[in-house]
């Protein structure tokens, strides 16, 4: 992750744009070089003239709306990481934007220095992984596999029976088990939860899991369902959410003590 990041905010609401600028300027030790555009035409011109690391994109601009906005940005700057910023009512569109080439999305109501920097960091690493693996614009499973190793989140994938397929390095660090210890074994035996506890496809939930030391961890979890020709896969990303109250009444799974 570079110590200086050039970001383009594409937002027609002055209050939202100001909030995002202030959030970026409060992030240390990373220095953000921030540009703003309130119209898509101005954003496309800037993207053609300046090399950006990330675009913070509002899909609802005056002269362009929805996924067409994303497509037009990608046509000019497909090598740039894109974080879609949206209102709660547009979350379904934001999920579809991930399939169309965006790297992450964030609800505007959740924008803080911490959440914005985390989304940008993830998006940049995801874009780098996609480029290095040649998976830009590929199917959902390929895109997911491309980012497992580079993602800053803990990511776990399970099959249709709830057995663990992949467990990236950040999952090892967060939860304490090595990937070879959990592969092929039921998710519930380690985290005390089944797949449905992590919400619907794309839904963000806060829940409590347990690490290897039997310590409760409150996490922000997002689940993505991937249907391939051969099988049904669910990928679950986990981010620590220390500010959310922990439910200590959850039963600790037996495997958590091993």
Image: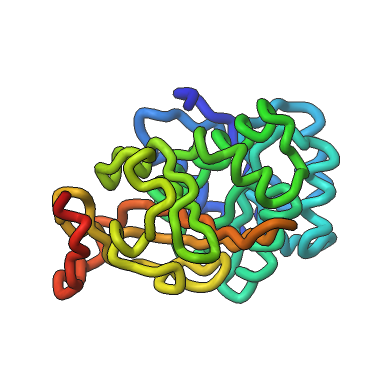
Which residue reaches farthest front? Answer: 184
- Residue 89, picture quadrant: bottom right
* Of 236 and 228, the residue lying toward us: 228
Tell me residue 1's x, y (percent).
Answer: 47, 27
Q: In this view, does 194 lie above or below 122?
A: below
Residue 25 visible from this viewpoint? yes
User: Horizontal placement of 166 versus 92: left or right?
Assistant: left
Percent of width and height locating residue 228: 70, 57
Looking at the image, which is closer to me, 118 or 43? 118
User: x%, y% of residue 19?
Assistant: 49, 54
Q: In the image, is residue 42 above or below residue 58?
A: above
Look at the image and name its color scheme: rainbow
Residue sitting at 77 percent across and 64 percent down? 66
Q: Quadrant of residue 209?
A: bottom left
The residue positioned 39% from the left and 36% from the top of the image is 169
**Residue at 38% from the left image edge and 40% from the top image edge:** 179
Taking the spot 57% from the left edge, 39% from the top edge, the residue there is: 147
Q: In this view, does 182 lie above or below 190?
A: above
> Which of 224 and 33 lies nearest the eye of the viewer?
224
Q: Which residue sits furthest top?
A: 3
Question: 183 and 170: which one is in front?
Answer: 183
Quadrant in the rendering for residue 15: bottom right
Q: Is residue 176 left or right of residue 135?
A: left
């Amino acid at each position: 992750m570079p110590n200086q990041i050039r970001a383009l905010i594409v937002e027609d609401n002055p209050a939202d744009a100001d909030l995002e600028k202030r959030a970026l300027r409060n992030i240390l030790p990373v220095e953000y070089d921030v540009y703003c555009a309130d119209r898509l035409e101005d954003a496309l011109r800037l993207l053609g003239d300046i090399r950006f690391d990330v675009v913070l994109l509002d899909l609802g601009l005056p002269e362009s709306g929805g996924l067409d906005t994303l497509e037009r940005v990608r046509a000019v700057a497909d090598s740039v990481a894109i974080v879609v910023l949206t209102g709660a009512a547009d979350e379904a569109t934001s999920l579809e934007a991930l399939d169309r080439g965006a790297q992450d999305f964030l609800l505007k109501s959740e924008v803080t220095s911490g959440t914005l920097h985390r989304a940008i960091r993830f998006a940049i690493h995801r874009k780098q992984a996609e480029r290095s693996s040649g998976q830009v614009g590929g199917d959902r499973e390929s895109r997911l596999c491309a980012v497992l190793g580079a993602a800053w989140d803990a990511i776990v994938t399970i099959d249709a029976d709830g057995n663990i397929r992949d467990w990236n390095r950040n999952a090892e660090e967060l939860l304490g088990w090595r990937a070879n210890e959990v592969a092929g074994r039921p998710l519930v035996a380690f985290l005390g939860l089944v797949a449905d506890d992590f919400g619907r496809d794309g839904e963000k939930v806060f829940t409590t899991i347990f690490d290897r030391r039997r310590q409760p961890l409150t996490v922000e979890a997002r689940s993505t369902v991937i249907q391939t020709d051969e099988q049904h896969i669910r990928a679950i990303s986990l981010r620590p959410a220390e500010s959310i109250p922990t439910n200590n009444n959850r039963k600790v799974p037996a495997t958590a003590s091993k």
